Image (cartoon, rainbow, N blue to C red):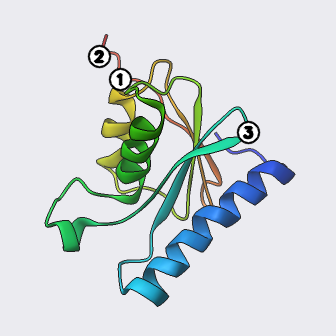
Amino acid sequence: MTSQLDAQDELFLARAIEISRHALEDEGKTPFGAIVVISGEIVGEGTSSVIELRDPTAYAEVMALRHAGSNLGRHLFEDAVMYASSEPCPHVPHGLLLGTHPPPDLRSQQPRRSHLRLRRPPVLP
C-alpha cells in the first residue's frame, strides 16, 4: 500500500534519517535508523547494533522497539507508528508483528514503497 506522507510523517522520517547519518558519521555503525511514535511523540529510537553487540537481531527497528519498551514499561505497541530510514530487512517485520496487534504502521523513505502497512500472517493468533 503506497500513500503520501504528510508534514508530520516527513518530520519523523527526517529524525530516522538523522539517526542513521549520525550512526554512520559519528559512530562508524551501519547507517540505519528507526523511531517509534505514539500519539505524535517519539517514544523509542534505534540504530543498527548488529556488529557491535554481535547480535543478529539488533536491527534499528528492533532496537527502537526495545527502547520504546524500556521507556514505556510495556512490550506491545498496537498504537505505534514506526519510521525507518530505509525499508527493513525481510525478517524484521516478523519481530514487529510480535509486538503489535493490530499490525504496525511502518513508514520509510523508499522509492518503491514509502508507506508500508505490515499485515499479520493468518497463522498467528
Query: Of the residues shown, which amino acid type is indicated by label 2?
Result: Leu
The dot on residue 25 is none
Identify the secondary structure beneath mark 3: loop
Could you tell me if the residues under marks 2 and 1 are in contact, i.e. CB atoms within 8 Å? Answer: yes
Tell which tag, 1 or 3, sits nearer the viewer.
Answer: 3
Q: Which mark is residue 40?
A: 3
Q: Position of residue 45 (x, y in %)?
A: 50, 55
Is there a contact, CB below 8 Å, between mark 1 and mark 3? Answer: no
In percent of the image, x 46 and y 18: which residue is there?
Answer: 101
Residue found at x 38% / y 28%: 99
Circle 2 is placed at which residue position?
124
Q: Quadrant of residue 108?
A: bottom right
- Residue 13 image offset from top left, x and y in percent: 67, 59
Look at the image and tell me whether residue 80 can be seen: yes
Looking at the image, do the residues carrying marks 3 and 2 touch, with CB atoms under 8 Å apart?
Answer: no
Q: Position of residue 70 (x, y in %)?
A: 39, 39
Circle 2 sits in a helix, a strand or a loop, which is it? loop
Q: Is residue 104 above or below residue 35?
A: above
Looking at the image, is 105 positioned above or below residue 102? Answer: below
Q: CA distance from mark 3 to mark 2?
A: 29 Å
**Of the residues shown, which amino acid type is indicated by label 3?**
Gly
